[in-house]
């Protein structure tokens, strides 16, 4: 392993000192919208990673989950592939400690974060994905304990339509059941109306598969609408709504090996309306209302007997938020308030309701032309956990126009889910006495952005108090959620990107990133079995190499993961595509070297899988 890490560092350093060309990346043009402040990526004082729409288009994946598995520092732990179900975490946190946002609106699943990525959003509607690393309570509020992932959608200016279809297989047979060859197929249609003062888009898709091993079939239906209206130069409204119905075989998902025939249905409705108003030249307000409904129907025996081993959960959340910014002669003030109500009606969690109120205050300024500072705090009241406060500060100093030193100190919290608190099952017992998790993190690093080259290096230290995990001291007793102790993590992440422009029509782009996490757990508890802590990452390498010649492109992606326990694994994927005017044909080969690997529990993920697809896009 040491040779691997030395090689990775050597390649990154080689890219860093490479002679740059005259081509210029679009990195500085990306504006990060953090609810109150809007900041060019080149001016960011935080460790923020951008996945652009151009990158998404080239990646060998058709779902949000598949796209995120190529992001540096992001840990996607799939039970069901191809968008069926996946947990997400950042820099070694648990899957409950990262908040997901859609255009700044929080997507929190208060039942369990297993369903947080069950979003009706097609990747074709995504403009970029912003991965913010580290505690972010003063920016995004609750549950942003180890990071935040903000999905920003497109505002197309041209009208048109999209039609796409695909089919794929691993060419293996279901020898245990039907004898049929495993396959997956889907179709998607969308339309866009792009005008000067308003933009509307609507997408619908249907995906179906008989799985990749026994009882892993799925059927997924989505619909998504978004509308933007610019009333005038001072007022803009954005609204979106979507629905997803996802049914799948859940073989080994939660209670292996007894749940071999289990199935699950997850239905999610998400709606959001927000607006921006310039009251004066220096004062803006941004109100927002968000609603999310989730239905989770788990059937331990599948459809054989719905009166035994069935769990049904109905979760609602509604949130209102008002943010504002005021530009001063020296700096800018941001402040805001939010209210959130969450309730659940469940067969084995019960009926529960809680409220959360948060207050934001931030100030940023440039003390000199080279020194930028952001400081702020988040004051939170939760009906179960009362008052808590989470301050933070970040700063940067520009040594040159291309080289910048950054540093930040942040705090945040995570409110336990309803499952953590109240679940009552044969093998899992919640704990109503849980305390909320709290995180402190300090980070220092640097950014280098010049022409075709960008390079980031960061070191962080994080401590999570009252870490929540499901523990037991023998395999014969149920799992129970516990505040298990304090988790201390030292981490290093490196990311380099270099673009070679061979000619006007020919270019090569190389991205190489490495994350190292050293986690030390301190606890006085006697339990010896843990559900989630032992699956955290220790080493991660992500690498993509893509070449484009006119309308032909080819991308090769490599992912290496080594966890605290269990075997390490390399997964290699490939996409080649050719566009002819508005028509594109693509071929994906995922896990091309047929690696055997697991990301959660005892759920093996697919062997080599090939997909052929076509799409027509006229906008």
Image: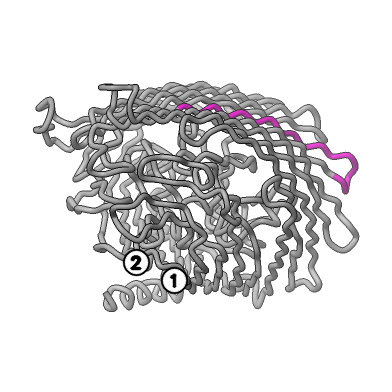
Residue indicated by mark 1: 519
Instruction: Determine contact: label 1, label 2, CB under 8 Å.
Output: yes
- Classify mark 2: helix, strand or loop: loop
**Is residue 6 among the parts visible in the rendering?**
yes
What stretch of residues is rendered in magenta? 267-283
Name which residue lies at 45% across and 66% down: 496
Residue 364, relative to residue 384: is it above or below? below
> Which mark, residue 564?
2
Residue 344 spot, x, y in % from top left? 57, 32
Question: Is residue 461 in the magenta section?
Answer: no
Name which residue lies at 21% across and 30% down: 183
What number of labels is visible? 2
Q: Which of the pair 498/68 is nearer the observer?
A: 68
Q: Which of the pair 266/2 is nearer the observer?
A: 266
Q: Is residue 375 left or right of residue 96?
A: right
Of the 4 image quadrants, the one containing the N terminus is: bottom left
């Amino acid at each position: 392993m040491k040779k691997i890490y030395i090689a990775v560092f050597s390649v990154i350093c080689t890219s860093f000192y490479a002679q740059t060309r005259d081509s210029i990346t679009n990195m500085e043009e990306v504006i990060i919208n953090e609810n109150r402040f809007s900041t060019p990526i080149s001016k960011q004082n935080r460790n923020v990673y951008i996945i652009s729409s151009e990158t998404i288009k080239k990646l060998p994946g058709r779902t949000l989950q598949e796209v995120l598995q190529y992001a540096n520092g992001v840990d996607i732990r799939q039970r069901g592939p191809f968008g069926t179900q996946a947990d997400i975490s950042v820099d070694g946190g648990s899957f409950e400690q990262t908040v997901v946002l859609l255009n700044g609106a929080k997507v929190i699943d208060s039942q369990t974060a297993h369903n947080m990525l069950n979003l009706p959003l097609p990747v074709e509607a995504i403009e970029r994905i912003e991965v913010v690393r580290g505690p972010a309570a003063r920016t995004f509020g609750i549950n942003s304990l180890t990071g935040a992932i903000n999905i920003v959608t497109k505002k197309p200016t041209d009208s048109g339509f999209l039609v796409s279809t695909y089919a794929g297989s691993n060419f293996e047979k279901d020898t245990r059941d039907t004898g049929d060859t495993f396959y997956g197929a889907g179709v998607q249609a969308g339309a866009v109306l792009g005008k000067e003062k308003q933009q509307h888009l609507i997408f619908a898709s249907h995906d179906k598969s008989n799985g990749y091993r026994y009882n892993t079939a799925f059927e997924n239906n989505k619909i998504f609408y978004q509308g933007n209206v610019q009333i005038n130069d001072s007022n803009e409204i954005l609204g979106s709504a979507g629905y997803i119905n996802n049914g799948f075989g859940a073989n080994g998902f939660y209670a292996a090996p007894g749940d071999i025939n289990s199935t699950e249905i997850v239905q999610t409705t998400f709606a959001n309306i927000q607006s921006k108003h310039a009251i004066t030249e220096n004062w803006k307000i941004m109100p927002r209302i968000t609603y999310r409904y989730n239905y989770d129907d788990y059937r331990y025996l599948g459809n054989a007997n719905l009166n035994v081993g069935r769990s049904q959960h109905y979760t609602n959340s509604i949130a209102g938020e008002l943010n504002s910014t005021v530009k001063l002669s020296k700096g800018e003030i941001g402040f805001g308030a939010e209210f959130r109500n969450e309730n659940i009606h469940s067969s084995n969690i019960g009926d529960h309701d809680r409220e959360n109120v948060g207050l934001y205050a931030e100030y940023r300024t440039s003390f000199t032309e080279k020194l930028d500072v952001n400081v702020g705090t988040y004051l939170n009241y939760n009906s179960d956990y009362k008052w808590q406060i989470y301050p933070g500060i970040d700063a940067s100093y520009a040594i040159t126009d291309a080289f910048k030193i950054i540093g930040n100190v942040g705090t945040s919290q995570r409110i336990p889910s309803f499952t953590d608190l109240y679940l009552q099952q044969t093998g899992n017992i919640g704990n109503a006495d849980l305390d909320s998790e709290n995180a402190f993190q300090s980070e220092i690093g640097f950014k280098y952005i010049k022409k075709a080259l960008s390079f980031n290096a960061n070191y962080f230290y994080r401590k999570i108090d009252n870490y929540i995990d499901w523990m037991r001291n023998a395999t014969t007793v149920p799992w129970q959620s516990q505040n298990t102790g304090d988790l201390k993590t030292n981490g290093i992440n490196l990311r380099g990107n270099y673009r070679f422009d061979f000619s006007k029509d020919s270019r090569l782009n190389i991205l190489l990133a490495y994350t190292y996490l050293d986690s030390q757990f301190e606890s006085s508890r006697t339990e010896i079995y843990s559900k989630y802590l032992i699956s955290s990452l220790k080493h991660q390498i992500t690498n993509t190499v893509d070449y484009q010649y006119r309308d032909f492109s080819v991308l090769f992606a490599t992912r290496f993961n080594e966890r605290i326990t269990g075997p390490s694994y390399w997964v290699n994927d490939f996409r080649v595509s050719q566009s002819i005017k508005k028509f594109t044909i693509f071929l994906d080969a995922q896990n091309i070297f047929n690696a055997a690997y697991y990301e959660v529990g005892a759920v093996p993920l697919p062997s080599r899988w090939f997909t052929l697809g076509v799409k027509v896009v006229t906008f």
